[in-house]
Amino acid sequence: MKAILILICLCLFASVSLAAPLTAGYMPKAKSGTAINDSAVYQNVTNIGIGSTNARGKLDVAGAIWVDGSIYQAGTMTGGVGLWLSQPDGGCSLCGPDNAGTTFACTNQTCPTGM
């Protein structure tokens, strides 16, 4: 019975081919029902980059992000910590609560290095 299962498994995977050699660090994706190639998602030791091989944080996206829903932040945000937003004019805004944690607002700020 084991020999039949192994034979079936080998037959199933025998028809899958790589479009080209996979590149280290890139997560593979199915190009078709029988072909696998690199995706746009790159993983270094601790971070994930989408469209980037130089992820500067847990998730680094090179390009615009479309969000249709909510963005949640776990833990406590205090003054100076929050969600950084880049503006079309090249400026930045920092959005988050005040030091007391009672008011949430966005203020224009100098962009952090690398943003």
Image: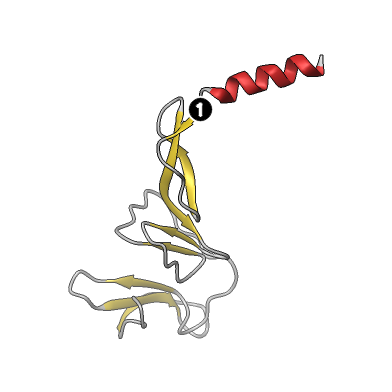
Could you tell me residue 14's position as x and y percent?
Answer: 56, 24
Find residue 88 and report its horizontal and vertical position in percent. 20, 69
Q: How is the image coloured?
A: secondary structure
Q: How many marks?
A: 1
Tell me: 111 left or right of 17: left
Going by the numbered disc 1, the residue's amino acid type is: Val
Residue under the image location 41 percent in, 40 percent down: 20
As rendered, which of 31 and 16 lies closer to the eye? Answer: 16
In the rendered image, which quarter is residue 64 located in? bottom left
Q: Which residue does the numbered mark 1 point to in the structure image?
A: 16
Taking depth in this image into account, of 22 and 58 the one nearest to the observer is 22
What residue is drawn where x is 50% and y is 27%?
Answer: 16
x, y percentage for residue 72? 50, 60
Q: Quadrant of the C terminus?
A: bottom left
Q: Looking at this view, name the residue that lies furthest to the right.
A: 1
Of the 4 image quadrants, the one containing the N terminus is top right
Around disc 1, counting alpha carbons within 10 Å, would you say few (fewer than 14), some (14 to 19), or many (20 or more)? some
Residue at 64% across, 23% down: 10
Q: Is residue 1 above or below residue 94?
A: above
Q: Nearer the viewer, residue 97 or 1?
A: 1
Residue 60 rendering spot, x and y as whole percentages:
42, 64
Residue 115 appears left or right of 16: left
User: In the rendered image of this protein, does residue 99 appear above or below residue 7?
Assistant: below
In the picture, residue 91 is in which quadrant? bottom left
Q: Secondary structure at mark 1?
A: loop
Which residue is painted at 24% across and 71% down in the image? Answer: 87
Up the image or down, 33 lies above or below 71; here it is above
Depicted 84 relative to depicted 70: above or below = below
